[in-house]
Each structure stands twice: as structure tokens, then as C-alpha cells.
Image (cartoon, rainbow, N blue to C red):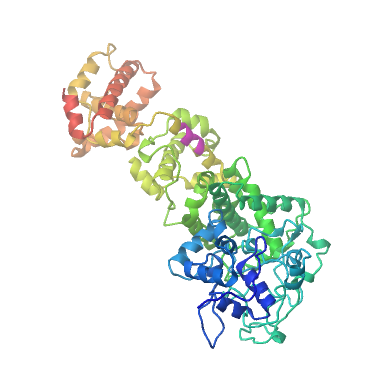
């Protein structure tokens, strides 16, 4: 039965549950373990210390909340303010942890949420000069649990993470709400690290460091640079009710993802702001290059100075007017081939992006899509997820990009590649964005019988050699925007219905009868010309390429006719498009008119059978 404690304390603004318990224990002159038991925060275990996991700092379940309120005489709002619950709508790692804990599982080790108070401000721990603060110290603050909080805005200094005396981290690595809670007589601001490294069974105050964390002087090296002060102010504002929760949540997820890339590719994005010292960051991230290093590549450093440089670089990238260009130097397609970064580090980031992409802003998802595709490989060509936010679907992409679009956006690449290769490749890339999977899958979707060979890789490799690895993606972006702004056409529907179609002989004779000029010596037989005209009309209707036109049924079982058609479709197609040979100058507008009429009929038909009936009428 929980009874009220003989004395209680009012929580300090922003105070953490663990800090409140330590201050209350110090006022009652008992060990924190006693307060944890008497407030219902730990299961009663007579012969052992209370096992109080850090999950309670996220949220107090209803039974524990009632017991805690009874013992401390706090209101529900005051007790809830001691936890991270109020920040959950704004800071996604808290929300993810809550989901796991509420499911009855142990709190996960998330990269962007410290398991316990891992940093502190000596000035805040010293208190505000009141009698209570002098006796029991100032608050251990809730937001010190968040890696994005690296400085104290009030005292304009970096947070610390090591004890100034023993130089050990203040975090209890064993996941307890309070480190060594059974030891009484410690001030809340005293270091609770054992003198013997790794000692978990320390039972007496004399076996602990006991240094006063609030008594170290700031010193000139701890001054907070202007740029970092501004960034910390921005982050604190994002955590406040002044900013919509959705906006804050997306910002912190974006910041987390970009910070991961900054750490993986450091020092590519090293900040150059005056007064920002990145030496600590160099040391911390250099240690992670060791293959035996167990820390996840995206885990933020506990060292506030090192973490601040990473966050400053990430925020600068997110603030860029052109986010995709700003992210380009961090893209693994460049770094894996030119800087020797272990691909596993990028795949780790890819996994995190897939897990949290729904929490990212739409702007970041769109900009980061091309990064993700190069992280995950599944054979030649590379696999990817469908891109979010597209205004077109795979079937809306023509198999052979319109020439005017290619000339407008791909001209810079013609010094190394032919225009047909660029047109074909870009169509496959646009399909892969919407379809996902591999370039081979995109080629198959478009009816390109080349198994994706040579699609994309030579172009992107050439762009990297020119020092513009993002150039081709940017050109594809512009073409995608032009495609989305044009009337969307289901080209796949057209290709499907015209798979077995051929220009009917009577329709061909009607066209041939209108030709006034006699055929030239290069004229082929009547039936061969009809089949070649079939290929030309197919390319006009489907916006396809002559080489991928379906083989007519007549030629499938006639090797001689098949060989002739394979040559005629290119020869006559060239004469028609060249529009210089008189005989084919007459033929071209007639075939174009037939193609336009056939296009309307195909778009209106739902099946090949319905198309056949429409053409028969």
C-alpha cells in the first residue's frame, strides 16, 4: 500500500523524473532506491535493489502514476511533465520507444534518444540560488536525454558528458533509471561512477567518484559559437508548442537522417562557420572507422561538441534551397566508388531510411529517393523502392522519350552518348522511379528486349568522372516534371493492344492508291511495304522505338519474310522520318493520319477483342 511521503518537493521546470527522485531522496536523507520503492516506481524486492528501468522516464503507466501521485502529492500534469511523454508528438524517437514499451517490450536502443541523462549543464545543476537549490541542487533536465540538445541556452555553453574528476561518462550503461540507487548520502549533482571501472556491485559512497558536477568552471574553450547558439535556439523552438507538432516531427526525422549521412561521409560536409571547432568530431568519427567499433554508424556522439558540428552540417543541408543538390556530395553512388567508404555503412543508412521514411518530410523523401536506390544492390542494375510523391505512374512513360524533351534536357550528355541511348535509358529510369525494383524490370515493363544491359550505369559513371554525379538525376527530374505537366497517356495499354496488330491490307491499299508519284527503284514489294508501315505506325501510336516494334504474325513462321521485315522497318522508317524522298513524302502524312485515328480507337478500347471489332467497323 502506497502512503504519502513525510515530505515532498515541487518539480523544477523541465526536470527529469530521475533527477526529481534524486533530489527528493536527498531531502529525505535516504537512498534513491527507497524513494523508488515508496513511490511505486519499482516492484517491491525486499533483498535486492529496486530494478527501475528507464522506460518509466518515457511514460508512467496508470497504476504507477496513481501510486506516484499519492506518495509525492503531485498532480497528474506535474508527474507527466517529469517524463518525455509531452515531447513525443514532436520528437519521433520518443514516440517509437513508447510504441515498443506499450507493447510490453523492453525500451529499444534508439540512435537518437539517450537511454538516460547523458549530458548536463553545471550551471543548471547548481540551481538558481534559492535555499532548496543550494541544499538539493538544480534540475537534471528532460531535454538532456535528446542528442539534439547539445548546449544550455540559458548559460550559453556546451553540455558536458564526462565527470571532470574521473573522466567517466555520467550515463549508467546498465539501463537503470538511476545509477547505483541503493547508495545514500550522495548529492544529486555528485558523480555516481564507480572508482573501479566496470564495477556494478559498488555498495558504498566511498567506492564512487563523488565529484560535484556543478562546480566545474566553464573556461574559455567552452564558449558557444554564434552559429551553434542559433541552431540550438531553433531546435529548442521546434520542441516547444510554438511550432506545429507535424512540422517539428518531420524536421527532427530529416535532421536525424541527414546527420547519419554526414557522419558516414565525414569530413565531406564539415561546417566552416567561424568559431566552430570540429576537432572533437574528427576524433570521435575517426574511432568509428575501426571495424571492431560496435556503435551504429548513425548513432550521435555523446560528446556535445562533436554532436553539435554534425547537427550544424545537417541543418545547413536541410536549409539549402535545392536540397537534392545539397545532398549530392553525400550520395553513396559517389562516395562508395571514390572515397573508399564501406558500403555496409550506406546500407545501414538505407535500412534506417526505409524504417523512418514515412516520418520524413515530403521534401526530403523526394530529394533522398535517388540516394536510396544506390545503397541497396540486388544484382546488376540495382534495386530500389518506388518513389513517393510522383505525379505519374509507370504506364505513363513513353518507351522512347520524345525527341524535343531529350534535346531540351539531355544535350550535355550527347558528347558521350547517342541520342537514342539517352532517350531509351531515361525512359527506363523514369519507369524505375515509379515502379521500383531494378532497371531490368523497368526495361521489361517498357518492352525493351535488352535485359537492361547498358541502361543507366555508363551514363551515371560518365557523369561522376565529369565531377557532376547528380547531373543526370537532375535532368531526369526536369523531364519527370515535364511528363507530369503533360496529359498523361497510358502507353502500356497501347503497347498491349497493338502487340499482334498489323496494318490491314485493305487499309494499306487505300493509302497506296492515294500516292500519285510512282515508287522509286528502292521501292519494296507491296506486302513488305505494308509490314514496314505497320512498324512505323506502331512507333507513332506507342511512342516506341522501331527496333522494339512487335514482329508481325506473317513473319513469325517465314524466315525469309522475317529477315526482309527486320531490314525494311528501319529502311522505310528512315525514309519516312527523313521526309526527303518524294514517294515517302507523300506516304508520311497518310500514315500519320491513320496513326492518329488508330490512337483514338486504341485509347477507347478496353481489350484486343474490342479493338478488333472497332477496326472491323
- Out of 453 and 123, give the one closest to the viewer: 123
- Say whether residue 609 is left or right of residue 267: left
Which residue is at a point 50% across and 52% down the rendered structure image? 359
Q: Is residue 74 above or below residue 614?
A: below
The answer to which image quadrant residue 105 occupies is bottom left
Residue 36, image x, y percentages = 58, 76
Q: Is residue 273 above or below residue 603?
A: below
Which residue is at a point 62% across and 67% down the rendered structure image? 288
Residue 1, image x, y percentages = 50, 78
Residue 131, image x, y percentages = 77, 69
The image quadrant where one finds the C terminus is top left
Total marks placed: 0
The answer to which image quadrant residue 594 occupies is top left
Q: Is residue 227 magenta?
A: no
Q: Is residue 545 above or below residue 252?
A: above
- Out of 129 and 561, give the one closest to the viewer: 129
Which residue is at a point 70% across and 52% down the rendered structure image? 271
Q: Is residue 478 magenta?
A: yes
User: In this rendering, does residue 197 appear at all?
Assistant: yes
- Out of 390 and 601, give the one closest to the viewer: 390
- Say whether residue 29 is left or right of residue 105: right
Residue 10, image x, y percentages = 66, 66
Single out the residue that lies furthest toward the bottom: 47
Part of the protein shown in magenta: 477-482
- Out of 481 and 407, give the one closest to the viewer: 481
Single out the residue that lies furthest toward the right: 220
Single out the residue that lies furthest toward the top: 516
Q: Is residue 77 above or below residue 508?
A: below
Main SS, magenta region, reads helix
User: In this rendering, does residue 297 appear at all?
Assistant: no
Amino acid at each position: 500500500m502506497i502512503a504519502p511521503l513525510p515530505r515532498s518537493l515541487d518539480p523544477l521546470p523541465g526536470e527529469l523524473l530521475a533527477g526529481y527522485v534524486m533530489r527528493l531522496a536527498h531531502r529525505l536523507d535516504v537512498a534513491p532506491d527507497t524513494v523508488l520503492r515508496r513511490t511505486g516506481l519499482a516492484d517491491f524486492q525486499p533483498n535486492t535493489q529496486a530494478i527501475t528501468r528507464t522506460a518509466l522516464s518515457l511514460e508512467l503507466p496508470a497504476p504507477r502514476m496513481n501510486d506516484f501521485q499519492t506518495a509525492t502529492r503531485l498532480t497528474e500534469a506535474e508527474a507527466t511533465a517529469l517524463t518525455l511523454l509531452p515531447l513525443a508528438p514532436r520528437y519521433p524517437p520518443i514516440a517509437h520507444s513508447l510504441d515498443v514499451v506499450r507493447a510490453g517490450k523492453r525500451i529499444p536502443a534508439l540512435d537518437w534518444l539517450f537511454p538516460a541523462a547523458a549530458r548536463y549543464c553545471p550551471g543548471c545543476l547548481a540551481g538558481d540560488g534559492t535555499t532548496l537549490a543550494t541544499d538539493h541542487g538544480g534540475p537534471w533536465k528532460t531535454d538532456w536525454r535528446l542528442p539534439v540538445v547539445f548546449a544550455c541556452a540559458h548559460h550559453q555553453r556546451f553540455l558536458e558528458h564526462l565527470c571532470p574528476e574521473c573522466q567517466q561518462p555520467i550515463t549508467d550503461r546498465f539501463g537503470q533509471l538511476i545509477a547505483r540507487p541503493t547508495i545514500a548520502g550522495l548529492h544529486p549533482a555528485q558523480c555516481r561512477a564507480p572508482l573501479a571501472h566496470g564495477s556494478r556491485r559498488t555498495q558504498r559512497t566511498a567506492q564512487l567518484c563523488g565529484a560535484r558536477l556543478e562546480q566545474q568552471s566553464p573556461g574559455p574553450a567552452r564558449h558557444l559559437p554564434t552559429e551553434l547558439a542559433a541552431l540550438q535556439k531553433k531546435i529548442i523552438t521546434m520542441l516547444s508548442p510554438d511550432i506545429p507538432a507535424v512540422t517539428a516531427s518531420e524536421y527532427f526525422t530529416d535532421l536525424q537522417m541527414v546527420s547519419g549521412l554526414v557522419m558516414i561521409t565525414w569530413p565531406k560536409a564539415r561546417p566552416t562557420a567561424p568559431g566552430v571547432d570540429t576537432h572533437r568530431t574528427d576524433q570521435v568519427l575517426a574511432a568509428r572507422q575501426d571495424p571492431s567499433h560496435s556503435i551504429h554508424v548513425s548513432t550521435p556522439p555523446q560528446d556535445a561538441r562533436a554532436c553539435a558540428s554534425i547537427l550544424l552540417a545537417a541543418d545547413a543541408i536541410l536549409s539549402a534551397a535545392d536540397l537534392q543538390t545539397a545532398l549530392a556530395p553525400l550520395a553513396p553512388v559517389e562516395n562508395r566508388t571514390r572515397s573508399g567508404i564501406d558500403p555496409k555503412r550506406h546500407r545501414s543508412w538505407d535500412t534506417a531510411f526505409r524504417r523512418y521514411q514515412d516520418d520524413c518530410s515530403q521534401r526530403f523523401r523526394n530529394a533522398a529517393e535517388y540516394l536510396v536506390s544506390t545503397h541497396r544492390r540486388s544484382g546488376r542494375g540495382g534495386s530500389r523502392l518506388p518513389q513517393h510523391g510522383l505525379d505519374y505512374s509507370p504506364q505513363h512513360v513513353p518507351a522512347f522519350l520524345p525527341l524535343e524533351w531529350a534535346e531540351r534536357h539531355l544535350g550535355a550528355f550527347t558528347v558521350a552518348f547517342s541520342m537514342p541511348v539517352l532517350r531509351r535509358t531515361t525512359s527506363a529510369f523514369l519507369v524505375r522511379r515509379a515502379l521500383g525494383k531494378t532497371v531490368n524490370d523497368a526495361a521489361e515493363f517498357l518492352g525493351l528486349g535488352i535485359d537492361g544491359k547498358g541502361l543507366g550505369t555508363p551514363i551515371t559513371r560518365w557523369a561522376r568522372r565529369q565531377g557532376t554525379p547528380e547531373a543526370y538525376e537532375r535532368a531526369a527530374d526536369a523531364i519527370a516534371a515535364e511528363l507530369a505537366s503533360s496529359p498523361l497517356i497510358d502507353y502500356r495499354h497501347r503497347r498491349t493492344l497493338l502487340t499482334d496488330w498489323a496494318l490491314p491490307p485493305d487499309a494499306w491499299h487505300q493509302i497506296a492508291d492515294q500516292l500519285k508519284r510512282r515508287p522509286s527503284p528502292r521501292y519494296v514489294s507491296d506486302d513488305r511495304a505494308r509490314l514496314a508501315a505497320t512498324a512505323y505506325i506502331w512507333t507513332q501510336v506507342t511512342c516506341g522505338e522501331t527496333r522494339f516494334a512487335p514482329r508481325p504474325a506473317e513473319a513469325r513462321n517465314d524466315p525469309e519474310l522475317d529477315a526482309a521485315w527486320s531490314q525494311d522497318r528501319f529502311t522505310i522508317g528512315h525514309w519516312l522520318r527523313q521526309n526527303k524522298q518524294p514517294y515517302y513524302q507523300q506516304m508520311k502524312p497518310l500514315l500519320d493520319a491513320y496513326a492518329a485515328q488508330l490512337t483514338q480507337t486504341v485509347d477507347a478500347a478496353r481489350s484486343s477483342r474490342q479493338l478488333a471489332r472497332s477496326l472491323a467497323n
